[in-house]
């Protein structure tokens, strides 16, 4: 249960953080390194659900 909760929080942080970093580059004209970091974090967000022991889709939807 704790492991599922930790993966859920990690996925949420990766989704929000990666999107925000990319947005800073795109809309605010910040450094391209923020876009690169955002894309890397979003890629990690794509991997986190595979580590989830529970059915991630159902847990994330809840």
Image (cartoon, rainbow, N blue to C red):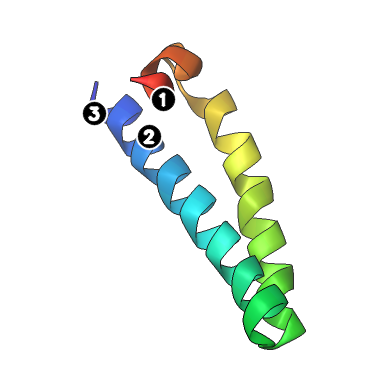
Q: Is residue 34 above or below residue 45?
A: below
Disc 2 marks which residue? Answer: 8
Q: Nearer the viewer, residue 9 or 53?
A: 9
Asked if labels 3 and 2 touch by Cβ distance under 8 angstroms, the answer is no
Residue neighbourhood size for the residue with mark 2, other residues' Cα within 10 Å, grouped as few (<14), some (14–19), many (≥20): some
Q: Position of residue 33 (x, y in %)?
A: 72, 81
Q: Position of residue 11 (x, y in %)?
A: 46, 41
Asked if labels 3 and 1 touch by Cβ distance under 8 angstroms, the answer is no
Earlier sequence position, callout 2 versus callout 1: 2
Quarter of the picture containing the N terminus is top left
Q: Nearer the viewer, residue 1 or 21?
A: 21
Alpha-carbon distance for marks 2 and 3?
A: 10 Å
Q: Secondary structure at mark 2?
A: helix
Q: Position of residue 46 (x, y in %)?
A: 64, 38
Disc 1 marks which residue? Answer: 60
Q: Is residue 4 above or below residue 11?
A: above
Q: Is residue 18 left or right of residue 3?
A: right
Q: Is residue 13 left or right of residue 44?
A: left
Quarter of the picture containing the C terminus is top left
The image quarter in which residue 37 lies: bottom right
Numbered mark located on residue 2 in the image: 3
Circle nearer the viewer, 2 or 1: 1
Earlier sequence position, callout 1 versus callout 3: 3
Alpha-carbon distance for marks 1 and 3?
A: 15 Å
Q: Residue at x 76, y 82 (%)?
A: 32
């Amino acid at each position: 249960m704790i492991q599922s909760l930790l993966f859920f929080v990690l996925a949420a942080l990766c989704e929000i953080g990666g999107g925000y970093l990319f947005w800073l580059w795109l809309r605010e004209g910040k450094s391209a390194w923020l876009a690169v970091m955002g894309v890397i974090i979003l890629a990690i967000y794509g991997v986190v659900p595979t580590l989830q022991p529970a059915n991630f889709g159902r847990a994330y939807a809840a």
